[in-house]
Image: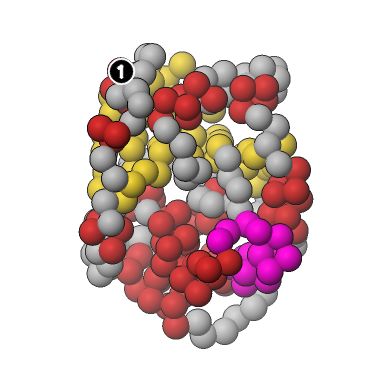
Amino acid sequence: MINHINPKAIFVREILEQNDLFITEDQWQCLETWVDRLIEINSRINLISRKQTEVVWLHHILHSISPLILIDFPTDIDLCDFGTGGGLPGIPLAILRPDWQVFLLDSRQKKISAIKETTDGLGCVNLHFIVGRGEEVGLDPMYNNRFQWLTARAVSAIGNLERWTRDLRDKEATLIAFKGGDLENEEVAPAQLPNVDRLVEHPIKLNGYFDFYFDKKKLVEIKFS
């Protein structure tokens, strides 16, 4: 694995430690190696905006890891990263939580093939890859009502995410949507969605880094029943 000094990576690690999230050396080296591969492969296949590669550690990696700081997760869960795109947040979460089984779902074979390439040889045996649309994958007996936890960093209204993940979710699942701005602008108020038991907005306010908070970025934790 690549082992080098990356000032931006070091800054992110310092922020995580200021927020009481401590990572082993092996996990950190794995994460750095994966980010280097993501940037390299992104020059060939658009996994993230090419304008964002200079700020990938802050705008993508730290953002993806923030649920581990702000939300209380159980151990040994199956988590579906819906619309994973470039593998965010699913791959960083899988690296830092090896007790989880993380399923990266995307409708585009090209994206899934590319993120498989980024993880080749990293030893992330808890990563799984699914190609398909959520509405269709959820009808597969292997995945129907399977997931108690889901993440969605893809830009879409929460009402769409609720509908697209409906058959993937366990009855009492929790969906974590990465959002920005005011939820009042949603076409359907999230609290009025079917079977919503509880909705909590977590502003992404981190010790040592406040840009997400100033930009009104948040995690929306939706508990279904």
Q: Which quadrant: the N terminus?
A: bottom right
* Image quadrant where residue 120 sits: bottom right
Residue at 50% of width from left, 82% of height from top?
6
Q: Position of residue 23 (x, y in %)?
A: 44, 64
Q: Nearer the viewer, residue 203 or 97?
A: 203
Q: Is residue 43 left or right of residue 30?
A: right
Q: Residue at x 68, y 69 (%)?
A: 43
Q: Is residue 57 magenta?
A: no
Colour scheme of the rendered structure: secondary structure
- Res 145 → quadrant: top right
Image: 28 above or below 180:
below
- Residue hosting label 1: 192
Check if residue 42 falls in the magenta segment: yes
| Residue 198 position in % (x across, y down) | 28, 24
Q: Is residue 24 visible?
A: no
Which residue does the image show at 25% across and 32% down from the upper left? Answer: 184
Range drawn in magenta: 33-49
Q: Quadrant of residue 95?
A: bottom right
147 with respect to 211 (left or right): right
Q: Amino acid at mark 1?
A: Gln
Q: Is residue 35 left or right of residue 16?
A: right
Whether residue 129 is situated above or below residue 169 in the rendered picture: below
- Quadrant showing the C terminus: top left
Q: Position of residue 197 (x, y in %)?
A: 31, 19
Question: Quick one: label 1, few (<14), some, or many (20+) residues within 10 Å?
Answer: few
What secondary structure is marked by label 1? helix
Give the percent coordinates (x, y) of residue 186. Answer: 33, 31
- Examine the rendering and report whether any part of residue 188 can be seen: yes
- Residue at 28% over, 29% down: 199
